[in-house]
Image (cartoon, rainbow, N blue to C red):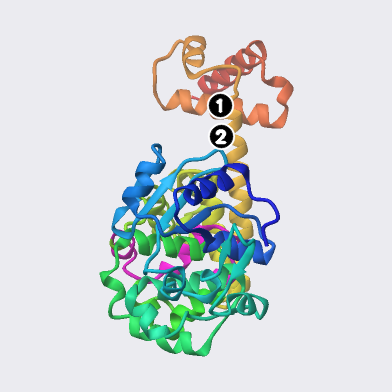
Amino acid sequence: MFDVLPEPVQALLDALARAGREAVLVGGCVRDRARGAPIHDWDVATSATAAELLALFPRAVPIGLRFGTVMVPTAAGPVDVTQYRAATLEGDLARRDFTLNAIAFDPVSRRAIDPHGGLADLAAHRLRAVGSAEERLAEDPLRALRAARIAAELALEIDPALEAALPGSARTLLGVATERVCSELLRLLAAPVPLPGLALLRRSGLEAVLVPQAREDALRVIAALPPDVTLRLAAWLRGTAAASVLARWRVPRARRLEVETLLALHPVDASAGAGDTGARRLRKRAGGEAQLERLLALREAECAAGSAPEPETVRQSLAALRERLARTQAQAVARDELALSGAEVMACLGVGPGPHVGAALRHLLERVLEDPAENTPERLRERLRSWSAAQHGAR
């Protein structure tokens, strides 16, 4: 399975062997190697205790002493090393969540240790619990949410026995640390195709705990969206007490504010107002071009999902709004790049601040948009004097 290990990982395993302790690779790195996927994290299970690990590796950081886990920094990246969850490796593997995570690799014999058929399940694209699904989920209710996330990430079919056990976790999931729940939710939404996992949450009743009163169309809308976690989260939370859900699961503040802004301005065709003035106000309220694009994408996804009333009318409205936004964005850029500042306009006209200055800048902007060659201080001053004279003549 592993012909050659990264030298720092091999050195760590050798150090444990010299100390008279068993040590194997386990979990995601073995699973991903078996799948032919890139390995991002290294995990080691060992018969050594956490105290022995800290003594053996002076740079180790205790990241979960309750579970006997330390992180050993290496040139190949951090390696998580955990004491066996039972007296033996076999007992440890029997306590793991899913069979595809209960495969170990022995660096001495260079063979896989797979007592629960994880390799066969990987080949069959199947997600199955180790032993009794009810017992594994009872040990850690977060495993129910993890099942949905892994099924989505790896495009796996869930074993019927595991799916049947998921509803039993609904009543205990609220007792799981919120940070752990948030991490799984965001990883699920980041999956290339999150729909199988989200559909599993809905069928099992877990969605009702995680996102109470989620709209019936939520999954269809998410399916029509680009791969953007913030946008997918906003689509999921439409029509719910979104602020409460985001706060309960302690979604990071920056993402929470983005989602709340999206929902406050949704549907964007109703929030834009009329004319270019409405487009400018929308841009300011949205807080940036990325948020504007998300607002448009969310409404377009509703059209694609059949959720928007009169979708063809909405699509036409969105196309017109895109034109207004593009025009006002060009104007905003041009204004920032005018060869004369507001202070220079006031000096040229001999006036102080006021609406007259804004009108003058708009006039210059229109000239520059028509002919960029006009955007020099000399030409703009000429245009400004002519405009001012015409204004006084009109009075």
Q: Is residue 317 visible?
A: no
374 displayed left or right of 391: right
Q: CA distance from mark 2 to mark 1?
A: 6 Å
Between 366 and 46, the residue placed more toward the observer is 46
**Residue that numbered label 2 is attached to:** 332
Q: Secondary structure at mark 1?
A: helix
Q: Quadrant of residue 248?
A: bottom left
**Residue that numbered label 1 is attached to:** 336
Q: Quadrant of residue 58?
A: top left
174 displayed left or right of 346: left
Question: Quick one: label 1, few (<14), some, or many (20+) residues within 10 Å?
Answer: few
Q: Is residue 138 magenta?
A: no
The residue shown at (43%, 77%) is: 215
Against 38, is 98 above or below? below
Amino acid type of the residue that numbered disc 1 sits on in the rendered structure: Asp
Q: Position of residue 210 (x, y in %)?
A: 35, 72
